[in-house]
Amino acid sequence: MNHAEKARDLFREGYNCAQSVVGAFHEEMGLSLSEATRLASSFGGGMGGLRETCGAVTGMFLVAGMLMGYDDPADYDGKKAHYARIRQLAEQFRQKHDTLVCRELLRSLPEKLQKDPQPRTDQYYKVRPCVRFVETAAELLDEMLQEQ
């Protein structure tokens, strides 16, 4: 099973969008699934239901930081290179989905967006496009990791 499939399956199990992406890469990050999903738990719903930056995107950035980030505050070149990677991932996601903003990604939903998580029902999965976003985020990470 590839990372996009893992992310999709995690989302369908009820994890939020950020948790689904981070959870799909938990082994590569040296984390248990529980640690990875706790780490990403704040970012679902566009950061805690604020409907700001899509959780799949913030999850993608978190994985990129863990696997390709810098840790020396004096490493200006490393910081510069990592920020360029993040901008590249953001632009690639934007090219596929037009925006990084949760509320804009979900603007076609028939109901008003809620800040609190919604029960995961068959109807939820029928109308929510989020599974596509977690798959895209995982695919973009895989592509970037293959280039490293």
Image: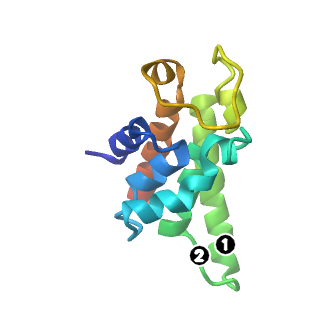
* Disc on res. 70: 2
- 19 vs 87, nearest the viewer: 19
Can you give x and y, in whole percent of width and height, for residue 32 in the image?
A: 37, 66
Image: 7 above or below 30: above
The color scheme shown is rainbow
Given the image, on which type of amino acid does mark 1 rest? Lys
Residue 8 picture location, percent across and down: 39, 38
**Is residue 135 found left or right of 100 in the rendered image?**
left
Q: In this view of the protein, which residue sits in the foreground, 103 or 65?
A: 103
Asked whether the viewer can see residue 23, the reply is yes
The residue under the point 63% across, 67% down is 81
Mark 2 secondary-structure assignment: loop
Labels 2 & 1 near each other (Cβ < 8 A): yes
What residue lies at 63% left-to-right and 84% top-to-bottom?
72
| Viewport quadrant of the C terminus | bottom left
Dot 1 alpha-carbon crowd within 10 angstroms: few under 14, some 14 to 19, many 20 or more: some
Mark carried by residue 79 = 1
**Is residue 148 visible from the viewing direction of this image?**
no
Q: Quadrant of residue 113?
A: top right
Q: Secondary structure at mark 1?
A: helix
